[in-house]
Image (cartoon, rainbow, N blue to C red):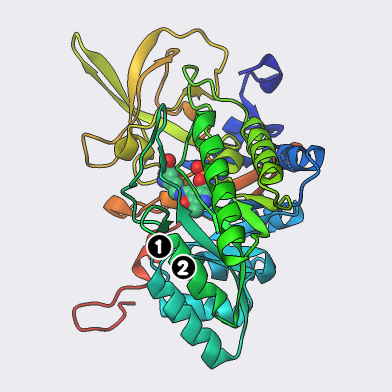
Amino acid sequence: ISPSQINAAGHLTIGGCDAVDLAHEYGTPLGVYDVSQIKSQIQHFQEVFKNNDVDYAVCYASKAFANTAMYQLVHEMDCHVDVVSAGEISMALHAGFPASKMTFHGNNKSREELQLAVDQGLGVIALDNFHEIDLLSDILEKSQAEIKVLLRITPGISAHTHEYIQTGQIDSKFGFDLESGQADQALQRVLQEPRMHMLGVHAHIGSQIFELAGFEGAGKKLVDLAADWKKRFDYEAEVINVGGGFGIRYTQADRPLKPEQFVDIIIKTIKQESQAAGLKTPAVWIEPGRSIAGPAGYSLYTIGSRKDVKGIRPYLAVDGGMGDNIRPALYDAQYEAAVANRPAAPAVETVHIAGKYCESGDILIQEQALPETQPGDILVMFDTGAYGYSMASNYNLNPKPAIVFVENGQATLVTRRETPSDLERLDFGLNGQQLS
Ligand code: LLP
């Protein structure tokens, strides 16, 4: 926390707003997004492409965090979006996001979802398997429509958080694999489809990746494939989409390259390899989710009960937990936190920050150093903007939190907090009737 983020009251500020005031005005748990951080990350990506003089699209992977305001914001910022369900497509359309700038992903898109995509004129379908090619072909024929497609390839590179392994045969549910000839078959199939326009190739090697080698490897593989297809099928890819996955810093132990540094190297790799292979430089598309939404997001909680386990540790409980952020319980994900009403106070103890859910595994942070705290203090957890609210649940019938966007000292409520009646609205009683 830099001193410039602390105001005269000694409170943490986010986007120029007092975090404690936000917690009191909108309640907790609260998701707060600093709009200027979202904008500047998108601009950094866009600058890298401009500096490399290459056609591009920055497709925000909206699974990381989606609500109506976020779709509006990324549209204002000239992004495309990656959507993965009828829900994401519908909300993006509801927000006024142009269908032509949506890429539809997923390994089991339903007929209804594909029909929606065709009816709405979605920009691109990223085809993942042969079943989907059949479904889409049938839908396009019946609807007398056309659509652009990418083929999602499994490049044989699996990237993990702190390592990458290159395997001949990758064990993944996504995409057409290279070694078995599936990708070639898919291309030949699509080239015969009069209503599909074969735009290019896609690969996404994983998420929260810190190593450059995986991205370089994927870029090379996709260009090799494009060169091979040019030679064998006289087909030249217009777009190479390398997916997302650029790792972000969650704790001080993390030291990733900046997301735009990854992208710079990916672009240079694709340009060089394409030139070497005698191909026109394709447009380079990326699909960052976490790197756009993650660092811009803050979670505010109110501190409640405390349990001291003698000789072991204190547990400090907050009013949220695995329902609004499943990542620590699911992936052992690490975060850092501070006390928003006393961010500069020196740490006096190390605590486990527990959620309120009825599970021992509902620990948001293990071993967080904190100053002295009292019930009613506001805890802020940093870098929670990606895959927190988007993966929220109603476990224990807790309502999902509200979301506020902040910028230049102004706060806007963009998603209201759920209420118990929101949770009851889909239910009927034992007699099949809605209860009043
Ligand atoms: N493109 C495709 C095709 C994807 O499947 C994903 C993420 C992305 C782009 C965006 O990746 P990002 O830039 O956000 O890393 N729930 C997990 C992450 C799942 C990512 C799924 N796909 C988590 O909380 O870490």
Badge count: 2
Give how far across and how far down residue 102 sits, in percent. 62, 64
Give how far across and how far down residue 270 sits, in percent. 65, 42
- On the question of residue 267 being in view, the answer is yes
Give how far across and how far down residue 276 sits, in percent. 68, 42
Beta carbon at label 1 within 8 Å of ligand 1: no
Rendered residue at 60%/59% (across/down) = 231
Q: Quadrant of residue 406?
A: top right
Looking at the figure, which quarter contains the N terminus? top right
Q: In which quarter of the image is residue 182?
A: bottom left
What residue did someone put label 1 on?
182
Relative to 107, is 286 above or below? above
Q: Do the residues labelled 1 and 2 touch (CB within 8 Å)?
A: yes
Residue most extreme to the front: 231
Answer left or right for 47 relative to 249.
Answer: right
| Mark sitting on residue 186 | 2
| Mark sitting on residue 244 | none
Q: In which quarter of the image is residue 91?
A: bottom right
Identify residue type, mark 1: Gln
Rendered residue at 56%/55% (across/down) = 228
Looking at the figure, which quarter contains the C terminus? bottom left
